[in-house]
Image (cartoon, coloured by chain):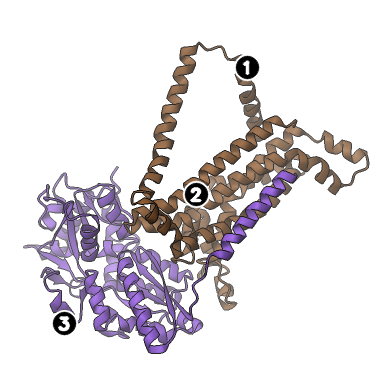
Chain colours: A brown, B purple
Amino acid sequence: MQTDKTLDRNVAGRTAGRGLTEPAPVRWGLTIVALLFLGLFLFVPLASVFAQALEKGWGAYLEAIREPDALSSVRLTLIAAAVSVPLNLLFGVAAAWGIAKFDFPGKSILITLIDLPFSVSPVISGLIYVLMFGLQGWLGPWLDSHNIKIIFAVPGIILATIFVTFPFVARELIPLMQAQGKEEEEAALVLGANGLQTFLRVTLPNIRWGILYGVILCNARAMGEFGAVSVVSGHIRGATNTIPLHVEILYNEYNYVAAFAVASLLALLALVTLAAKSLVEWRMRGEPM
Amino acid sequence: MSTSKKWFTLAAALALTVTATVPSHASDVTLLNVSYDPTRELYQEFNASFAKYWKKKSGDDITVKQSHGGSGKQARAVIDGLEADVVTLALAYDIDEIHSKAKLIPENWQKRLPHNSSPYTSTIVFLVRKGNPKGIRDWSDLVKPGVQVITPNPKTSGGARWNYLAAWAYALKQKGGSEASAKEFVTRLFKNVPVLDSGARGSTTTFVQRGIGDVLLAWENEAFLAVNELGKDKFEIVVPSLSILAEPPVTVVDKVVDRHGTRKVAEEYLKYLYTPEGQELAARHYYRPIDKKVAARYAKTFTKVKLITIDEVFGGWQKAQKTHFADAGVFDQIYAPSK
C-alpha cells in the first residue's frame, strides 16, 4: 500500500513542472524563502565546520587528520562501510526482487520488517546487540568461553552499522521494480531464458541506477552513524572509535580545531554523496525505464 | 552495468588502500584503561610517562589505550564485556558493581592498594562565570530562585553522585540539620537544574561551551582544566565552606589480565600512580596527591577546605547508593525533569 503511494508521489513530482500557472512573484517569493532556509540551516553550519577546522591554518588541520587515532577512526569507518554496504546491497536486491516480482504469503510482514530499523531508535538497536552478545547477554557466556569478541570490538560496530543501514537499498528498489512490473521478465521466460539469465539480463540492467542510488544513501548513513555504534563501541581510542565517535571525543577534550577537522571529512563525504546522488538522479531520468 | 562496476571497484580499491597504508601500532603489550570522564588529560600524559618507565625497566614497548565516559556507564560496559585490563573510575561503588554483577574481580579489591586503592583524591567545587554575577559563595546560594545549576546525572555519572552527596552533607551539617532538611535542600537544588548530562565532561561542555547555567558543580580538577583551557577571563572557581573527599579508586580486572597475560604490567601500571612521578603528574592535572612531599609542593594550588568523607556521613558507598541512587531511591523521589 505504502509503496504505491510513494510511487504516486514520484510520478506527481515529475509531472508537476508542466502545469505551472502561479504568477512570477509567488514563484520567486517561494524560491527565495527556500533558498534562505537552506542557507541558514545548511550552508552556514557547513561553512562554519570548515571555518572552525581551519581556524589555526592548514598545518593544524592536516595534523589533526594525520594523527594516529584519527586515521584509525577513518580506517574503522571505511571497514564498517565496506562490509555493511555490499551485504545490504545483496540483501536489498534479493528482497526487492522477491517482493516486487513474486506473490507470497507474509509479503507485507517482510516489508514491515525491512522498515524496522527506520522506526527503531539507533540507541535501542545498539542495546539489542549488547543484550544479545554482551557478557551478561544471551550469547555472552558462550562467546566469552570461546574467546570471541563481538561488542566493544569491530564485529559489533559492523553489526550495528548493518542494522541501521538495512533498509536503504531495498526501500529504493521496491517501488522502482514494482513500477516496472514483471512483463519484461515474463517475456524473457517465454523466450526460453532461465531464472538467472532473466535476472542478469533483464532485471538488473533495469534497476542499476536505482541500486547505485540506494548504495550511495546506504554508504552515507553507514559512515555517519553515531547512536547505535556509540552503544557497542566501548570508545577505545585508536581501536573502536569511528569518525563520528572520534569527533565527539575530540570535542569533549576542548580540542575544537581537531574535532572540526575530522568532522570536515564527514562533511566532505556528505558533499560527495550529494554530487553523486544528483548525478545518478540525472542519469536515472535520462534512461528509458 | 559496466560504469557502476567501475565505481564499486574504485570504492573497494580506495578502502583497501587506506586500510593497508595506515600503520598499526607495533608494540609488545597493550593495556586498556577504562576510566571516567575528567581523567583524559591526566592519563594521556601518565601513559606516556609509564611507557618510558616500563621500557627502561623491562625493555618491552607498551601501549595503553584509553576509554572515557561517565563512571557508571563505563562500569556497565566492563560488566557487559569491554575488556579493560585496569579500571580507574570515579567511585568505589562502580567498581563494586564489576564484582557483584560480573565477578571479574574479587570482593576485597579495594584492599589491594594503599589508601583504599585511591592514588589521588579530589573534591567538588563550583565553577562560576567571571565576576560571579549571581554572588555564589556556598551551597546555600545554589537553591536561591533564579540560579541555574549544572550537574550531570547521578544515575550515570560518578562526579554527579559526589555533587549530590556533598550538597546533602552540607545541609545535614547546618544548625538543626536532619535527614528531612537535607532532603528538602537537595530537592530545591535540583529544581534549579535545567539539564542533566550523562557525564561530567558533558556538563562542563554544557556550561562553558553552550553557555547554559550560572554555576557548574564540578570535580576540582575539571574546574581547573576548564579555567585553564578556556580562559581565566571567563570563569572563576568558588570553593564552598564544606565539601566531600572524593576518592576515585583503581584496580586491575583480574579475569581480563589473566586471560591477556598482562597481570604483571597492569599491576605495575597502577603502582606507578603511587610513585613520586605518578603523584607529580596527578597534582599537575589538579588531582590532590596523597604523597606528602608532592602535596606540600602543590599546597598553593589546592585550597584548604573542610572535607567530609562518605564513610562518616553516609556509611559507605553501598549504603549511599542504595538509599539515594537506586531505583525509587531518594534521587528518584525528588527529581522531576523541569518542564
Q: CA distance from mark 3 to mark 2?
A: 51 Å
Label 2 Cα neighbours within 10 Å, binned few <14 / some 14-19 / many ≥20? few
Q: Is residue A128 visible?
A: no
Q: CA distance from mark 1 to mark 3?
A: 84 Å
Which is more foreground, mark 3 or mark 2? 3
Q: Residue at x 28, y 53 (%)?
A: B335
The disc label shown at residue A18, or none: 1
Residue type, numbered disc 2: Ser
Check the residue under mark 1 and report the chain it is in: A
Q: Total label count?
A: 3
Q: Position of residue B298 (x, y in %)?
A: 15, 74
The disc label shown at residue A121, or none: 2
Dot 1 and dot 3 within a common chain = no
Q: Is residue B205 left or right of residue B166?
A: right
Relative height, residue A89 to residue B331 (above, below): above
Check the residue under mark 3 and report the chain it is in: B
For the residue labelled by badge 1, is the local secondary structure a helix, a strand or a loop? helix
Q: Is residue A79 visible?
A: yes
Q: Position of residue B26 (x, y in %)?
A: 50, 76
Residue type, numbered disc 3: Lys
Q: Residue at x 33, y 52 (%)?
A: A56
For the residue labelled by badge 2, is the local secondary structure a helix, a strand or a loop? loop
Q: Position of residue B294 (x, y in %)?
A: 18, 79
Disc 3: which residue: B292
Label 1 Cα neighbours within 10 Å, binned few <14 / some 14-19 / many ≥20? few
Identify the image quadrant of residue B271: bottom left
